[in-house]
Image: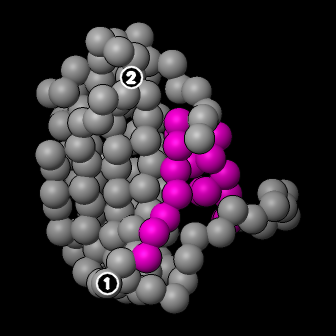
Amino acid sequence: MLTARLSTDPAEVGRARREVRSAMASWGISEEAQEAAVLLVSELVTNALLHGTPPVTLLARRTRRGARVEVHDADPTRHPTLRPAQTELAAGRGLRLVDALASRWGWSPSSHGKGVWFEVDAGADGSGARLSRGG
């Protein structure tokens, strides 16, 4: 299991990507699933740093199907919202990427704020990942 407390420094996004990639590689998660997860980590950590409240915590763990990544922050009031795509806006598409690439994703309130999570599937043996959307 990976647990990292992130500072508000934007460089933490890169650190989070590196740590998730390293953990997933050690768990035998396929390169395809690692690539998707790294992109999604960028989105969730960036959102937490821009819109959440410190502290921000990154959790990742191996699951039976692949891997689950969670990003927690201390703001219980701002919930992630999947907005309609608007081509004229430069931002606001991050959760669309999460929705498109993650096998499953969601968020949940906690006693300390909220957690936004996603899962990627890596196949029964940890290889040959097929990122399929599911519920």
Residue drawn at x 17%, y 61% as measured from the top left? 4
**Residue 55 shown in magenta:** no
Residue drawn at x 67%, y 57% as measured from the top left? 93
Classify residue 4 as left or right of residue 21.
left
Which quadrant does the C terminus fall into? top right
The residue where tag 1 is placed is 111
Classify residue 93 as left or right of residue 79.
right
The residue where tag 2 is placed is 122
Three-letter amino acid code of the residue under disc 2? Ala
Answer with the quarter of the image where residue 11 lies.
bottom left
The picture places residue 57, in percent across and down from the top left corner, at 25, 68
Mark 2 is surrounded, within 10 Å at the Cα level, by few (under 14), some (14 to 19) or many (20 or more) other residues, namely many
Classify residue 25 as left or right of residue 40.
left
Classify residue 87 as left or right of residue 19.
right
Residue drawn at x 19%, y 27% as measured from the top left? 27
Mark 1 is surrounded, within 10 Å at the Cα level, by few (under 14), some (14 to 19) or many (20 or more) other residues, namely few
Q: Is residue 11 visible?
A: no
Residue drawn at x 26%, y 60% as measured from the top left? 58
In this view, the mark in front (1 or 2): 1
Answer with the quarter of the image where residue 116 lies.
bottom left
The picture places residue 103, in percent across and down from the top left corner, at 53, 36
Three-letter amino acid code of the residue under disc 1? Ser
Which label's residue is closer to the chain start, 1 or 2? 1
**What span is in magenta?**
91-109
Image: 72 above or below 3: below
Front one among 88 and 25: 25
Q: Which mark is residue 33?
A: none
Q: Secondary structure at mark 2?
A: loop
Q: How many marks?
A: 2
Q: Is residue 127 visible?
A: yes
The picture places residue 74, in percent across and down from the top left corner, at 34, 84
The picture places residue 28, in percent across and down from the top left corner, at 22, 20
